């Protein structure tokens, strides 16, 4: 599985950004797709994931971020609204595959999101 991420950038507090992540390769085995982020000096944390139509969000982004999935394009989108400075981080796309008893995680390149005035 290969993941191509796009989006990110610099935005003022209260602004919006959209991240995209397109999957290719053995997409039939993808069970879950989503986004994680890592801020400087902090551990990587889950932002939002979609597991076969069931979406989970970190408490810190609920009501502000929306994860959507376009199965025809094998792409997930993370719409980020009402951005706060604490959302500043490197965001990474993740895909988890399950093949029998084998579980594997794939990562796209990270994209920087900076929220600052």
Image (cartoon, grey):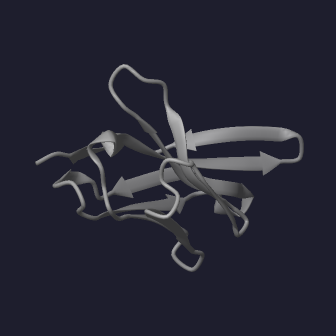
Question: Residue lying furthest right in this view?
Answer: 100
Left or right, 1 with respect to 19, comes to right
The residue located at (39%, 44%) in the rendering is 91
Left or right, 80 with respect to 15, comes to right
For residue 65, above or below residue 41:
below
- Horizontal and vertical percent for residue 51? 71, 59
Would residue 48 be visible to someone looking at this image? Answer: yes
**Viewer-proximal residue among 7 and 42:** 42
- Horizontal and vertical percent for residue 42? 42, 23
For residue 4, above or below residue 88:
below
Q: Quadrant of residue 105?
A: top right
- Horizontal and vertical percent for residue 46? 55, 42
For residue 11, above or below residue 36:
below
The residue located at (71%, 49%) in the rendering is 97
For residue 28, above or below residue 61:
below
Left or right, 111 with respect to 47, comes to left
The residue located at (29%, 58%) in the rendering is 7
Question: Residue lying furthest bottom in this view?
Answer: 72
- Horizontal and vertical percent for residue 28? 71, 63
Question: Residue lying furthest top in this view?
Answer: 41
Would residue 109 be visible to someone looking at this image? Answer: no
The residue located at (34%, 44%) in the rendering is 87
Q: Quadrant of residue 104?
A: top right
What is the total number of numbered labels drawn onto the structure image? 0
**Viewer-proximal residue among 18 and 59:** 59
């Amino acid at each position: 599985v290969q993941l191509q991420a796009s989006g990110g950038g610099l935005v003022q507090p209260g602004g919006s950004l959209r991240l995209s992540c397109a999957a290719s390769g053995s997409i039939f085995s993808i069970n879950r797709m989503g986004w994680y982020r890592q801020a400087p000096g902090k551990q990587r944390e889950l932002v939002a994931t979609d597991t076969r139509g069931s979406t989970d969000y970190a408490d810190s982004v609920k009501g502000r971020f929306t994860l959507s999935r376009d199965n025809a394009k094998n792409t997930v989108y993370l719409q980020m609204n009402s951005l706060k400075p604490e959302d500043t981080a490197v965001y990474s796309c993740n895909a988890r595959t399950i093949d029998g008893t084998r579980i594997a995680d794939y990562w796209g390149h990270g994209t920087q999101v900076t929220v600052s005035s």
